Amino acid sequence: MGLNIRDIIPRKEIEFSDLKGKIVCVDAYNMLYQFLSTIRQPDGTPLMDNKKRITSHLSGIFYRNINLLSEGVKLIYVFDGEAPALKVGTHNKRKESREIAKKRYEEARQKEDMGSMKRYGSQLIRLNNKMIEESKELLEAMGVFTIQAPSEGEAEASYLNKIKSDIYGTVSQDYDCLLFGAPMLIRNLASARKRRTFSGWIEIKPELIELQGVLNILEINLDQLICLGILVGTDYNPKGIPGIGQKRALDIVKKYRQPVLIFKDVEEQIMSLPKEDRFDWKEIFELFHKPDVKNFEIEFKKIDEEKIKEILVKEHDFSEERVEKQLGKLRELKEKKKQKGLGEWI
């Protein structure tokens, strides 16, 4: 789900080449769900191997990350740990959404409506432990550093982005990373580079959002941004306060400034919500302000081509020719680095 504040957040498009040589922290679950929902057959079913095991996530990890690695981007994938208790409501809502999507998918299948089947099929996704473990295994074989966060992956990625000067940005589609204090949020990094629309194909470029720039333009501080998010609705209070959208929330936080005064103004509206949708703003505010995170030493390992082939080709029936072709891109990059290093030594 994530926080919806897109309409008020300033951003700029960048080129993939702008990230050459930079280290970025990826919100792993967010990225894997992207792969599972978008890399699908025309009828909405995910890619599978000969044993009917889902491979959409592995396809995304390999082919889309190869493109980034060959651009010289260094990747750190941060996986979720134990979710805060407050996220139970979000998990329940997602489960309800999947049930609805399942019913609509079956209806579309009976009508042979391929467009609807693809749309609803992408909403049936669920990431299980097996997918997570094989994702880590493939990423590590590709030379991508993986981290197991103590709690929220996006909070951990944002934290590392804050405390380590050599980490350029946090990669996620969710704006929640800004509330966790990520200095740089990068969106669309592993999306397909072209998207089909009613008017034809359009190019999809990465978007860069600078937290300090956001705060300066909106004329608020980080505490106010967190309050704004809570008013609109976060993963900890998915429905927010009905009737308060992004622009009105911005007006409220700018008018009252202090968190206590902001939520005093909307206290009656919070209490009028159904019991299951009411929330304690202080508890949510604290989760964004002081998330469960820890420092990690970052160490990039060498690419293990044989392990990659074993996972993709031998275990999951990927085309050996296609895999080999992609690995060739990494060999070229490695050779360029070697030549550059030799040139500098000379």
Image (spheres, helix red, strand yellow):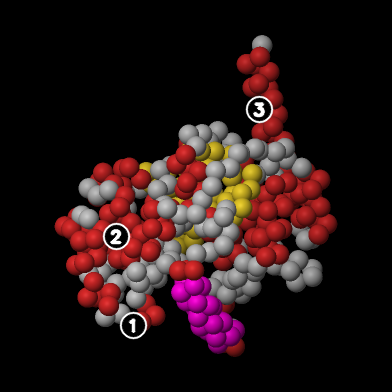
Residue 19: image location, x then y, percent = 50, 38
Q: Which element is circle 3 on?
A: helix
Few, some or many residues within 10 Å of mark 2 (<14, 14–19, 20+): many
Q: Are marks 1 and 3 in contact (CB under 8 Å)?
A: no
The chief SS type of the magenta part is helix
Q: Which mark is residue 128?
A: none
In the rendered structure, does residue 94 fall within the stretch colored magenta?
A: yes
Q: Residue at x 58, y 59 (%)?
A: 81
Find disc 1 in the rendering and name its residue. Answer: 274
Is 82 left or right of 229, judged from the image as shown? right
Q: Which mark is residue 337?
A: 3
Q: Which mark is residue 228?
A: 2
Q: CA distance from mark 1 to mark 2?
A: 21 Å
Q: From this viewpoint, which residue is outermost toward the top?
A: 346
Q: Which element is circle 2 on?
A: helix
Residue 283: image location, x then y, percent = 38, 64
Q: Residue at x 47, y 48 (%)?
A: 158
Q: CA distance from mark 1 to mark 3?
A: 59 Å
